[in-house]
Image (tube, grey):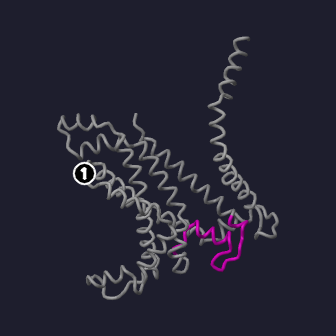
């Protein structure tokens, strides 16, 4: 018993030691901010999802908001489908492209630093500014892209990129890839640089070519990091908002609306909509559950990426 008491006292003393207190004090602002700006808003969202509330007056209406989401609001599901299509098409291009550039930049070639900065630069530009830039570049009249295509004889008349759904979605995909490929290149570079060079040297001595080394050594070694990069890219793509708001704003006729812009407009009464905070909260809950399901499915499917 004495030993147990001494053991507890020793453990408590270590926990309350100088280093532990300093660590807790340094982490506490972040933890407090995380609680205030993450968990408390989630609780309020769950509360208001069963309310008919416009920011001033409200009353409990039970599951009416959820019934409306699942039975009477086809536009919400169309926006969710647009989100999945945009995220899927974007990731099919973005992830392989980021890995390709990372492999090239990982080689000890003179001048790669300039290319690293150039490829990473779009990441530090505001997404709203990127959306504005691409909306001007792809403008139907006096847009840079249309002018270039006409000059080289590829088209005879300007294309109304934002006048049709799929051309507008194409512009959104290009802008999103350009915006986020740089950060994924950096992540892949860190993963590639963590691979011991001895493995590649041994494989080279055994006669393995570059493609064989990439498949048998590089991909398995970066598997765990690749898993995290892809998960972050999936979640980030499904939560796209400001890029769409700054470029198409859901046009034409709401056909490029994504789920986050759709919820945003109902929450704040934007684009002529009446503010319906209760209904927007219910849509947020449904969207959160959808993202959770996607995450669980991905984690189950990608568990084999871990190196044994």
- In the picture, the quarter occupied by the N terminus is top right
Placement of the C terminus among the 4 image quadrants = top left
275 left or right, relative to 170:
right
Instruction: Report whether residue 89 is seen.
Output: no
Residue 247 in sight from this viewpoint: yes
Residue shown at 33% from the left, 52% from the top: 102
Residues in magenta? 255-280
Task: Name the residue located 45 percent from the left edge and 70 percent from the top edge.
Answer: 172
Residue 70 rendering spot, x and y as whole percentages:
65, 65
45 to the left or right of 134: right
Residue 19's place in the image compared with 72, above or below, is above
Residue 273 at x, y percent in the picture: 67, 77
Give 246 or 45, whichever is nearer the viewer.
246
Q: Is residue 256 magenta?
A: yes
Q: Among all residues in the image, which is located at the extreme top? A: 2
Q: Is residue 158 magenta?
A: no
Left or right position of 156 against 289: left
Q: How many marks?
A: 1
Q: Residue at x 50, y 66 (%)?
A: 127
CA neighbours of label 1 inside 10 A, class few (<14), some (14 to 19), many (20+): few
Relative to the observer, which residue lies in front, 78 or 212?
212
Query: Which residue sits at x=32%, y=54%?
Result: 113
Q: Hey, which quadrant is residue 56 in on the image? A: bottom right
Q: Which residue is mark 1?
A: 109
Q: Is residue 299 above or below residue 111?
A: above
Q: Position of residue 78 (x, y in %)?
A: 55, 70
Q: Secondary structure at mark 1?
A: loop
Place of residue 169 in the rendered image (x, y in percent of width and height, measured from the top left) = 45, 72
């Amino acid at each position: 018993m004495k030993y147990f008491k001494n053991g507890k006292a020793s453990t408590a003393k270590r926990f309350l030691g100088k280093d532990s207190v300093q660590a807790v004090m340094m982490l506490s602002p972040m933890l407090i901010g995380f609680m205030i700006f993450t968990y408390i808003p989630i609780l309020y969202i769950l509360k208001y999802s069963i309310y008919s509330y416009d920011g001033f007056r409200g009353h409990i209406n039970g599951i009416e908001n959820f019934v409306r989401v699942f039975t009477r609001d086809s536009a919400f599901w169309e926006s969710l489908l647009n989100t999945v299509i945009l995220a899927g098409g974007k990731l099919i291009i973005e992830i392989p492209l980021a890995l390709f550039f990372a492999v090239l930049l990982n080689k000890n070639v003179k001048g790669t630093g300039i290319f690293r900065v150039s490829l990473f630069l779009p990441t530090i530009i505001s997404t709203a500014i990127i959306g504005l830039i691409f909306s001007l570049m792809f403008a139907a009249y006096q847009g840079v892209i249309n002018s270039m295509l006409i000059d080289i004889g590829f088209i005879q008349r300007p294309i109304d990129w934002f006048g049709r759904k799929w051309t507008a979605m194409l512009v959104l995909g290009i802008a999103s890839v350009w915006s986020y490929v740089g950060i994924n290149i950096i992540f892949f570079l860190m993963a590639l640089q963590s691979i011991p060079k001895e493995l590649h040297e041994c494989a080279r001595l055994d006669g393995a070519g570059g493609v064989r080394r990439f498949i048998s050594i590089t991909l398995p070694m970066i598997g765990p990091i690749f898993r995290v990069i892809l998960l972050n890219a999936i979640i980030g793509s499904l939560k796209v908002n400001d890029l769409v708001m700054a470029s198409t704003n859901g046009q034409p006729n709401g056909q490029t609306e994504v789920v986050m812009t759709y919820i945003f407009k109902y929450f704040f009464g934007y684009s002529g909509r009446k503010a319906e905070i209760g209904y927007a909260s219910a849509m947020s809950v449904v969207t959160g559950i959808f993202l959770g399901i996607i995450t669980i499915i991905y984690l189950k499917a990608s568990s084999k990426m871990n190196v044994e």
